[in-house]
Image (tube, rainbow, N blue to C red):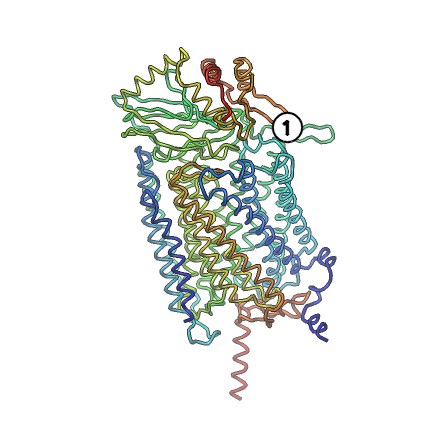
Amino acid sequence: MRRKPTLFAASALAAALLTPAAQAGNGGFAPIAPESPNAHSIHQSYLFISIFTAAIFVMVETLLIVFVFRYRRRRRPRFEEGAPIHGATNLELLWTAFPVVVLFLIASFIFIKLPGIVDVPSAGVKGQLEIKVTGRQFYWQFEYPNGVVSIDTMRAPAGVPVYLQVTSPPNDVIHSWWIPALGGKIDAIPGRLNHTWFQVAKTGTYKGQCAELCGLEHANMLASVQVMRAGAFDSWLFAEKTAQVQGTSTLGKQEWAGVCAKCHGLAGEGGIAKAIAGSSLLTDPRAIESIIRNGTTTPQGTMPPVASGWSQEQVDALTRYLKEHPPSGS
Amino acid sequence: MAAETRADAVPAWQRGGVASWLVTTDHKRIGILYLWTALVFFGLAGIMALIFRTQLAKPDSTILSPQHYNELVTIHGTTMIFLVVVPLLSGLANYLVPLMIGARDVAFPRLNALSYWLYLLGGLVLMLSFFAKGGAAQAGWTSYPPLSETTTGHGQDLWILSLHILSASSLAGAINFLVTIHNLRAPGMSWARIPLFIWSIEIFAWMLVIILPVFSAALTMLLLDRGVSFAGWNVQTHFFNPASGGAPLLWQHAFWFFGHPEVYVLILPAFGIISEVLPVYARKPIFGYKAVALSTVAIGFFSMLVWAHHMFAVGLPTSLQAFFMISSMVIAVPTGIKIFNWLATLWRGNITFDTAMLFACGFLGVFVVGGLSGIYLAAFPVDWQVHDTYFVVAHFHYVIFGGSVLAIFSGLFYWWPKMFGRTLDEKLGKWQFWVVLIGFNLTFFPQHLLGLEGMPRRVYTYANQSWEGYNMASTIGAYVTGIGLLFFVWNVIKTARSGPRVGNDPWLANTLEWYTTSPPPPHNFDEVPYVTSARPLYDLRQRLRETERARVGD
């Protein structure tokens, strides 16, 4: 009778642990399925470590439960002394050596996998693409070799090693670039240039988001990588260059959604920053340019210089978009 | 007549009005002040957690604004570490260190009082910063610049002020513990005979003495970077400001040189509590006293060499990352020694499952999860995946809640009779244990999976619908944990009114604090026995038994 509440509590605990695990979409206990060789090697390292952690977990919990049941008092007097054992040097040396061996194996595995994670594969026949990734409050800016710019959505060719240079402007804060399926994260730090890479075989969209607290809209600093067939990517990049020079690209729309709308709302209805729909400034390109390049301080708050360092093409894309699509407020 | 009896039962040092508590320099009273204050902050920081867990239960919630969310997570973290766990441990240590080593008080009683009052002041500054212009600090408990330098308003400045005050408090307390342990031990109590809890406080104090000055220096640099105006002088430095050539990573190095050992500051005394509780309820000596004591020293030493494992994603050279991976893994060895020695302490024991023992065994079962998840974080390429996600949040809550807090409750149930002369209610205690254990695991286990699925920490909302299940489970778990902790509040009130009174040594324990009355007189001991082993009270009982046997033989 007395053991029933304990048994009940123990089974409730097991249920509490297993229910969420059972409903997991991706096999539960492993990271998101890797789609790039470096992410794949990290995934294997994760699984290799899990062999040992699972074994040690089962061993420790089993010993604990067995000892708890086997050596509980039952009918013995409460203060009867247990076995007067003060230690056992050989046994203790054994369980000092055991973790050393386990950790040696884990570290060795990591060092074996390391080159496949950090070294960018040689370019090969298809060449290598280099993209500059700039993290800013609260958007990602991507610059391609031919000067094309995109915001928050990166396009990349399938099958080609893509080398990323990751940074943040000196007047910004630290962000962290992370697309879980494409490898580990790397911080975008003002004044430092970091790098990482990926190479994806499958076309598709891979999502991620900023992983270092960067301010109020950190949670909405999303990023995605759209992997296209290499040929389709090349033609897109070429066409986009022309479009951006001629001012016919979607860059202005991307900038509105990625740079302005996270604080002011997609329809300019306001968010953490004030509502700007209907403001006469929006249709005045010079006023807009001055505000977004230099920032401004009003009694209602401070507008940061979100567009400092932008090219004239980038600024024009936004002012043109605002003129053609003034935010409606709803 | 009845009133007189009650007055007799309460010793002189516990009598007296509020004023007597304000001016007290008695380590027992100061310890109790620490405990009550820390428990109040525990409640406040717990309520903060419930508020933001409510926000996160579903995607796209709008219960909290981003600013309020960031304020709450920042102050929740800072409060739990600096105002709850460290002071709970300091409170226990304050009460117990002199008693366990057979001393009358700490070495510097007035400095001890100063430590407490500075702690209270620092805590009030932090709590009141919510009402500052621009709200409380919002850059997380790690307060990385440049973010922590760009926020306007005074929240961040008050955060710095509060931590400066708390550092001074902890530093004075640590020096006091060190001088006390080194100089005031009972006759015969050599270093190989001091209780394991005292070993853990010795290392805890040494670590604080080494790391706090570094932290204070970094805080001062952050303050000056934010700009200080005083009597017509304007000081504006650029230590961490990249726009003027400063190095934001310098803060991270200094912060984590403090911050990682700080984690062991939180856990080592918890280890010490477990090493005291297990032998008493298993009726066995600790398995491998020397190994357990030495592993405490080893953990303290190595914890100073691992800080950059918090910085694997900042782009350090690979050789440096490899060094910090190996040094972090090395810590697993002494930690493993402890776990195996504790398990071996249970082996062939005569185990009674009072609440203190339940919490100690719960600690063993849960802490091991936090230890094992740490291996993933030490392996730097794997850390690049899980760093700054909910996996890390789960990891350190398994260590700090599943480890430190469960151990502290074990210690409170164990030492409560000594401190207040009454035992806490066992039935309520067992309810508390099981409800907290289930709630805790339900809160934090799913967070491992959220992190693996890509949810970063410190986001005020999320759009990904597939994260909802785990988040909802986590939020429900948080409320269950909260309910579990209310059992403790109920228990404390009930015990104060009608808890059964106990004698000097209700558990037939091993250490000197049980030699004196419960609660002890102002001077702690009328006389202190000569200590001949790490278990002086066990020795006394043996000697008594032999004397009796000899008398019967006559």
Q: Is residue B284 visible?
A: no
Q: Position of residue B161 (x, y in %)?
A: 64, 40
Residue at image location 49% in from the left, 38% down from the top: B460
Query: Are there few (<14), some (14-19), or many (20+) residues within 10 Å of tag 1?
Result: some
| Up-down relation of residue A179 to residue B108 (above or below) | above
Given the current orientation, which residue lies at the most extreme bottom position?
Answer: B554
Q: Quadrant of residue A91?
A: bottom left
Q: Position of residue B316 (x, y in %)?
A: 44, 33
| Up-down relation of residue B264 to residue A36 (above or below) | below
Q: Which residue is mark 1?
A: B236
Q: Position of residue B125 (x, y in %)?
A: 65, 43
Q: Quadrant of residue B88?
A: bottom right
Tell me which amino acid carries mark 1.
Answer: Gln
Residue at image location 42% in from the left, 28% down from the top: A194
Quadrant where the N terminus of chain B is found in the figure? bottom right
Q: Is residue A176 left or right of residue B173?
A: left
Q: Nearer the viewer, residue A227 or B147?
A: A227
